[in-house]
Image (cartoon, coloured by chain):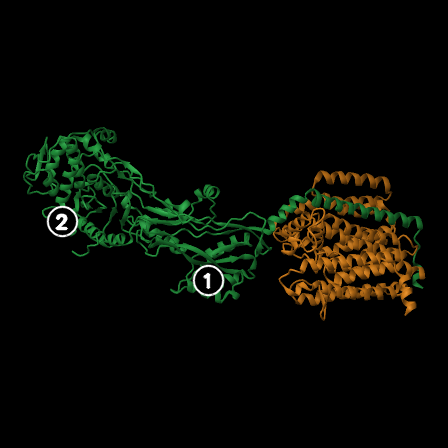
Chain colours: A orange, B green
């Protein structure tokens, strides 16, 4: 036992783990301050529940750390297939019950299968890319990675949970960059998405299209590549807006509400305003612990889950937000830097995927609380209340913090 | 060995890529950090203010309105508790079900309280202000409130609110003097809110004393305090360091009205007839009773809006116009009651002598090409002034008028307060009209009528002028007493917060310039009217020296109006009564008995 513990200590990266635990403790404090005045007595003890989830998470990390590298590598595809099955099952069982189908209940524990699907996709992509680099010279090299991405994504979009499926993209792009694409190729690869963004302004899009054209002509010799990329961009930039304008209002609103289900000026708009008021009114030093008026008078809906960062901003001011932002940036920078310390391509890819996923969650959630991003259902890792999110985030850190040492052992 | 397939990452490549990621990540994070600098440091004060406004709500505690009492302390207007059913929309879970449940509620008469269309409107409004209570029904009867309270758990979002409403315990008693309440009109609201601190939906006096003494006396000062509320609008506690204001009840006023006298006057006046009664004290202008018939119940204006509109329409379109205060705004030809003005003018200017008998009365008087009739076709024979007044002989006064001239008649009429507002403390009053040669020509210029001497004859007997009942009550005192003509008033005093009384400041309309001899003759004449042989015998009071004068005003639109005034004791009158009964014939037979009942009550000599 003595030997086991000391070996465990050697197996993980202590910096990442310590940062993670600091964040979790801050999260529990914030959950307490957000719910201690709640009308519902069950709400007032949520911080205790979060503490229990943390303990469960620690056990999970312990298990993850002990799992040998070989095992992870060998069972990657099995794990991937398993999570696909779960997604399908959720769709089927969920379809009979009305409402959201994101949850999968096992007894009292509600699981979000999409959390596991994210990890499965990262592992599967890493395993494939680690032995099959992608390249524009060989278009067929994209087939398998895209398939790995699109199957679970399609299942989750059907749930529907667009923000979670966007997480897959946020993971996919850095991973294929690591997996062989150059920066320029990556630019060509994501150009259709950029076209979609620029399509709102025809001059902006035209400028982008001309830039794209020159870059393609200068750096690519393959006429098929050039023409196909330009065609796709043209279709998105010109044809899509025309089609969009032809649509009836109710059709548009259907599409908009599909893309952003919380697109409700009264609901989500209210949340963002109250969140900004909460954060802004914290000023530099904050209103003080448990002295937050916005929070304790429940002006903020979902304050202990998705909007936990506003609870922080109101009570601890800019100093508090700066400190937590710093913790997150150091943690994620640390994870990215871990990816470069080893020549093992599989473990590096997994770490890139994990870091990107956490980074995306953090970015989207925090920007949402200050109105830089639309309101989505993405929780803030480690800080938001919720077992599923906390445990899966902890597993991700546990994996990332131990992979380097694992692959060294291997 | 599958793992053998893993490629190696080249050191430089992986370090470059990792650094690129970190750089990219930190760049994005700096953007977010800048946003936080902007929100928390640059705009911090702005959001801080917003958060204060968010949690604070200005809570208005409605001040009770001041009560109105009669001069003996009988409460004529007070506040009563009432209940409103309101909706807090954010608590509603199933709007359709709630609406259906509400529509099933019935009052004791079996009528539904809510109808679907109104409910839909109200719910729509409530949805936009979901944290404020929106009134669904006001002044709900107690039995309905009980039903709602019992089923409040089945009615999520519904609350019962306490309000305070104006109540007039004696219903129609003195309704025209008291006036009534109404909601502030849209036009007035903006100026009233800024100047007088009114809230939307507040009731305000719109008629009578309720309007006259609205500010300063009846309306209190609403309390104001800032309370901390949570997002659901629930009060947590008051915020101490914010400015606040205590509720101040309206001071209330005591009226010169005498409840008993008012009641007797109203009972004496036939309900089926229109007209007015004013009783006042000539010594100071205190109005002891003021009746305008038909009366209305001012309580209906403070009932639920549903009842209100129903009654309001009925009152508004009633041909008898019950909402008019005839005592101050009704204008009638004074008829023979005016003869004392003619007599006073002639006597005081030494134009006629008290014993002077003109051409005897044979039922009519020939002037120019026209014959002017006396009311008594049989004629009165030759009369001196006392008998001329006692019998109210028209022919006698035609001749007094002709001799005195219109200028003096008009001058004395103005002196006695006719043709101008008395300045009574009510918002509604008419001035009436006294015509002389100049004003007549001016008035009828468009029609091409020109003053003729024959007009003097009509003026002398009170045809051609119009006066209000309150003027008619105010002037008899001036005929017999030496003091000034006072401004009649209803305000007696108002208690100050320190216990002292703010009393009415006596105000005069003018001084009466009558010689003592004139006055003595007028007293005799007035007395003779009441005594046997006079036209006003019905107003007699045992052992009290009463004087009066009857009048029958010709009415081109219908039957003659009956008029009468009386005062007593004649030496030092403390009460003067004027009665006008529309379309009722002779003043002596219809109006004088009403005055008699009032006088007998006043002098505490009931009977007859």
The answer to which of A277 and B186 lies nearer the viewer is A277
Residue marked by disc 1: B103
Q: State which quadrant residue B234 falls in.
A: bottom right
How many angstroms separate mark 1 from mark 2 (CA)? 63 Å
Is residue A304 shown to the viewer in this render? no
- Percent position (x, y) of residue B183? 42, 49
Q: Earlier in the sequence, mark 1 or mark 2?
A: 1
Give left or right: position of A64 versus B552.
right
- Residue A62 circle label: none
* Dot 1: element: helix
Same chain for mark 1 and mark 2? The answer is yes
Mark 1 vs mark 2, foreground winner is 2
Task: Judge by depth and name the residue closer to the eye, B447 or B378.
Answer: B378
| Residue drawn at x 62%, y 50% as measured from the top left | A265
Give the image location of residue B161, x and y in percent.
Answer: 48, 58
Secondary element type, mark 2:
helix
Query: Where is residue B277 shown, x and y percent of the image?
Result: 24, 48
User: In the displayed image of the protein, which residue is found farthest to the bottom?
Assistant: A107
Marks 1 and 2: CB-CB under 8 Å? no
A132 or A228: nearer the eye? A132
Q: Quadrant of the C terminus of chain B?
A: bottom left
Residue B89 locus on image (x, y percent)? 54, 57
Q: Which mark is residue B537?
A: 2
Residue A43 in the figure: left or right of residue A397: left
Q: Chain of mark 2?
A: B
């Amino acid at each position: 036992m003595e030997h086991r513990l000391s070996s465990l200590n050697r197996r993980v990266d202590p910096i990442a783990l310590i940062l993670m635990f600091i964040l979790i403790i801050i999260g529990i404090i914030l959950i307490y301050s957000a719910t201690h005045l709640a009308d519902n007595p069950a709400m007032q003890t949520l911080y205790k529940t979060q503490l229990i989830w943390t303990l469960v998470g620690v056990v999970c990390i312990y298990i993850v750390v002990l799992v040998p590298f070989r095992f992870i590598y060998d069972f990657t595809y099995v794990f991937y297939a398993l999570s696909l099955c779960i997604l399908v099952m959720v769709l089927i069982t969920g379809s009979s019950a009305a409402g959201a189908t994101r949850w999968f209940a096992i007894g009292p524990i509600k699981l979000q299968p999409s959390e596991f699907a994210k990890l499965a996709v990262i592992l599967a992509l890493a395993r494939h890319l680690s032995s099959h680099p992608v390249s524009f010279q060989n278009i067929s090299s994209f087939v398998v990675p895209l398939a790995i991405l699109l199957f679970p994504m399609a299942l989750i979009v059907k749930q529907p949970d667009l923000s979670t499926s966007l997480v897959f993209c946020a993971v996919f792009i850095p991973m294929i960059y690591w997996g062989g694409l150059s920066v320029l190729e990556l630019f060509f690869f994501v150009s259709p998405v950029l076209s979609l963004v620029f399509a709102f302004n025809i001059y902006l899009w035209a400028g982008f299209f001309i830039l794209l054209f020159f870059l393609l002509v200068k750096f690519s010799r393959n006429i098929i590549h050039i023409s196909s990329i330009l065609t796709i961009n043209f279709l998105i930039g010109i044809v899509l807006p025309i089609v969009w304008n032809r649509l009836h209002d109710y059709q548009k609103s259907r599409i908009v509400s599909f893309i952003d289900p919380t697109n409700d000026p009264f609901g989500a708009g209210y949340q963002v305003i109250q969140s900004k008021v909460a954060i802004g009114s914290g000023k530099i030093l904050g209103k003080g612990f448990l002295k937050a008026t916005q929070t304790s008078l429940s002006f903020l809906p979902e304050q202990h889950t998705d909007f936990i960062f506003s609870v922080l901003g109101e009570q601890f001011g800019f100093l508090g937000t700066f400190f937590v932002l710093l913790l997150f940036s150091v943690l994620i920078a640390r994870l990215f830097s871990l990816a470069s310390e080893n020549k093992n391509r599989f473990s590096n890819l997994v770490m890139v995927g994990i870091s990107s996923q956490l980074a995306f969650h953090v970015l989207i959630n925090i920007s949402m609380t200050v109105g830089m991003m639309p309101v989505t259902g993405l929780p803030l890792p480690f800080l938001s209340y919720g077992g599923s999110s906390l445990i899966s985030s902890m597993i991700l850190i546990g994996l990332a913090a131990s992979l380097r040492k694992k692959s060294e052992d291997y | 060995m599958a793992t053998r397939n893993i490629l190696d990452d080249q050191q430089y490549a992986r370090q470059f890529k990792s650094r690129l990621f970190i750089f990219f990540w930190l760049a994005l994070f700096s953007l977010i950090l800048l946003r936080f600098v902007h929100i928390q440091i640059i705009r911090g004060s702005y959001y801080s203010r917003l958060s204060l406004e968010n949690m604070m709500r200005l809570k208005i505690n409605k001040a009770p309105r001041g009560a109105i009492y009669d001069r003996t302390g009988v409460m004529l207007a007070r506040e009563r508790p009432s209940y409103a059913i309101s909706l807090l929309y954010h608590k509603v879970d199933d709007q359709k079900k709630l609406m259906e449940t509400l529509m099933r509620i019935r009052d004791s008469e079996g009528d539904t309280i809510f109808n679907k269309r109104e409910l839909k409107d109200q719910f729509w409004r409530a949805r936009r202000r979901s944290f404020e209570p929106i009134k669904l029904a006001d002044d709900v009867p107690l039995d309905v409130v009980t039903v709602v309270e019992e089923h409040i758990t089945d009615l999520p979002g519904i609350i019962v609110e306490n309000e305070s409403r104006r109540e007039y315990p004696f219903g129609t008693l003195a309704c025209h003097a008291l006036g009534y309440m109404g909601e502030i009109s849209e036009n007035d609201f903006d100026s009233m809110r800024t100047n007088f601190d009114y809230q939307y939906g507040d009731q305000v006096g719109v008629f009578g004393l309720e309007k006259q003494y609205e500010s300063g006396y009846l309306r209190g000062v609403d309390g104001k305090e800032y309370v901390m509320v949570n997002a659901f609008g629930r009060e947590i506690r008051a915020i101490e360091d914010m400015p606040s204001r205590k509720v101040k009840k309206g001071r209330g006023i005591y009226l010169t009205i005498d409840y008993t006298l008012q009641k007797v006057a109203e009972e004496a006046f036939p309900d089926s007839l229109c007209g007015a009664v004013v009783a006042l004290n000539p010594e100071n202008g205190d109005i002891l009773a003021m009746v305008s018939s038909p009366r209305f119940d001012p309580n209906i204006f403070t009932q639920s809006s549903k009842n209100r509109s129903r009654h309001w329409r009925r009152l508004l379109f009633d041909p008898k116009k019950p909402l008019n205060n005839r005592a101050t705004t009704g204008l009638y030809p004074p008829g023979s009651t005016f003869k004392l003005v003619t007599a006073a003018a002639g006597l005081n200017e030494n134009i006629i002598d008290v014993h002077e008998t003109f051409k005897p009365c044979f039922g009519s008087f020939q002037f120019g090409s026209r014959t002017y009739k006396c009311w008594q076709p049989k004629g009165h024979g030759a009369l001196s002034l006392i008998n001329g007044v006692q019998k109210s002989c028209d022919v006698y006064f035609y001749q007094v008028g002709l001799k005195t001239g219109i200028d003096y008649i008009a001058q004395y009429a103005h002196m006695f307060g006719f043709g101008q507002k008395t300045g009574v403390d009510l918002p509604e009053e008419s001035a009436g009209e006294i015509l002389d040669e100049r004003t007549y020509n001016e008035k009828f210029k468009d029609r091409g009528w020109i003053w003729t001497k024959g007009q003097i004859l009509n003026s002398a007997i009170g045809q051609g002028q119009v006066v209000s009942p309150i003027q008619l009550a105010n002037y008899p005192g001036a005929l017999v007493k030496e003091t000034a003509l006072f401004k009649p008033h209803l305000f007696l005093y108002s208690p100050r917060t320190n216990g002292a009384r703010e009393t009415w400041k006596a105000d005069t309309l003018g001084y009466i310039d009558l010689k003592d001899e004139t006055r003595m003759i007028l007293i005799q004449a007035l007395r003779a009217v009441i005594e046997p042989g006079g036209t006003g015998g019905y107003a007699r009071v045992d052992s009290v020296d009463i004087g009066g004068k009857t009048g029958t005003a010709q009415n081109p639109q219908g039957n003659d109006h009956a008029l009468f005034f009386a005062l007593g004791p004649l030496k030092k009158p403390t009460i003067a009564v004027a009665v006008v009964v529309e379309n009722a014939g002779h003043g002596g037979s219809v109006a004088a008995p009403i005055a008699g009942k009032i006088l007998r009550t006043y002098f505490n000599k009931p009977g007859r």
